[in-house]
Amino acid sequence: MMRPRALHKPEPAIPDLDTLLPELDAALRADGNWGAPASYIPELARIDPAQFGISVVTADGRLHQAGDTKTRFSVQSITKVFTLAIALGRSGDQLWQRVGREPSGLAFNSIVQLEREEGRPRNPFINAGAIVTTDEVLSGRAPRDALAEIVQFIRTAAGSEDIHINDRVAASETAHGHRNFALAHFLASFGNLKNPPEMTLGTYFHHCALEMTTTQLAMAGRFLMGSPTGPRLLSTARVRRLNALMLTCGHYDGSGDFAYRVGIPGKSGVGGGILAVVPGKASIAVWSPGLNVYGNSLKGTDALARLARAMNWSIF
Ligand code: DON
């Protein structure tokens, strides 16, 4: 007697991360095509693009990793996630009077929308929005005190005190940060800065210049996956909202492409890092300094696309 044909193919087995990550690392290195690091911050432009690291912390607290996971890199815009978490903790939903929650569809450092929308940045992850959240965290304090709070939040999240600001990178960006100065002065002209623009920007440049390894960054992202193993730094409702913003706005005008290819919340930095979250399952940090056309890590995005596919981690 003929057996009835199965209607559905069986789900492929989920691979073991300790096997998958070294394979992914080898495959990406074999591909070549590393892209070029950010050129507008001279200290970042000098970095060898042929580097790649990936670290994954799963909900059971275990760490899996491969590649250059011990190299410190400039986390840049990834700190905007932590600054937003602190700003929301300090000001609650009042923050949304100063900054929106919509994708901008424009580059991270674009100026044009800010004038059209009367000084209220589209979201907290484009530069203008992050300058506002930094201004909220600063709130009349000395920059040193605001920075101490930001650094301590990240150290607590990561469970590591060995996380520091690279002053050379901060100075390099300050010397070449004409667009950010323009954005900050635009915000001030619309009455959307509480502190002098130079003071807010100094704080912003310094938190962007924090350096971490992928191991530290994946550990720091544990609070966003909502697992019981990491520190509980935010309420569940706020964690969900932060993830929603990372999904819709975390890669600027490349956010749609990232959601399409990877399918999980993520926040990129121009230093080549990406922090990505699989709600309830994993916190992932990837780093490779060469960037794609949107200013997001080329190989980092490829790695996340392959990892999410292999692990069936897309949230869709
Ligand atoms: O303000 C800047 O331009 C940098 N400190 C951060 C930009 C950034 O990381 C964009 N992300 N891809």
Image (cartoon, rainbow, N blue to C red):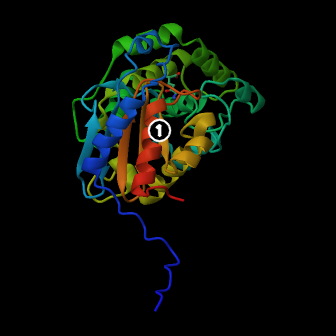
Instruction: Farthest residue to the top: give it.
Output: 175
Q: Badge 1 is on which residue?
A: 302
- x and y percentages locating residue 203 in the rendered image: 44, 22
Residue furthest right as drawn: 116
Residue 31 placement (x, y as % from top left): 42, 30
Give the vertical position of 192 relative to 262 (above or below): above
Residue for point 45% across, 13% down: 45
Q: Residue at x 39, y 22 (%)?
A: 209
Q: Is residue 154 visible?
A: no
The amino acid marked with disc number 1 is Asp
Decide: few, some or many residues near mark 1? Use Cα within 10 Å; few <14, some 14-19, many ≥20: some
72 and 308: which one is in front?
308
Say which residue appears at 46% left-offset and 86% top-offset.
Answer: 3
Would the CB of label 1 be found within 8 Å of ligand 1?
Answer: no
Q: Residue furthest bottom?
A: 1
Return the x and y of residue 241 as percentages of the image width and height: 52, 53
Q: Is residue 155 left or right of residue 291?
A: left
Please say whether residue 25 is visible from this viewpoint: yes
* Figure quadrant of residue 226: bottom left
Choose top left, top right, bottom left or bottom right for residue 250: top right
Classify 204 as above or below 60.
above
* Identity of the residue drawn at 55% across and 18% down: 196
Number of numbered callouts drawn? 1
Quadrant location of the C terminus in the rendered image: bottom right
Q: Position of residue 174 (x, y in %)?
A: 48, 11
**Up-down: is 104 above or below 279?**
above
Judging from the image, what secondary structure is the residue with disc 1 in?
helix
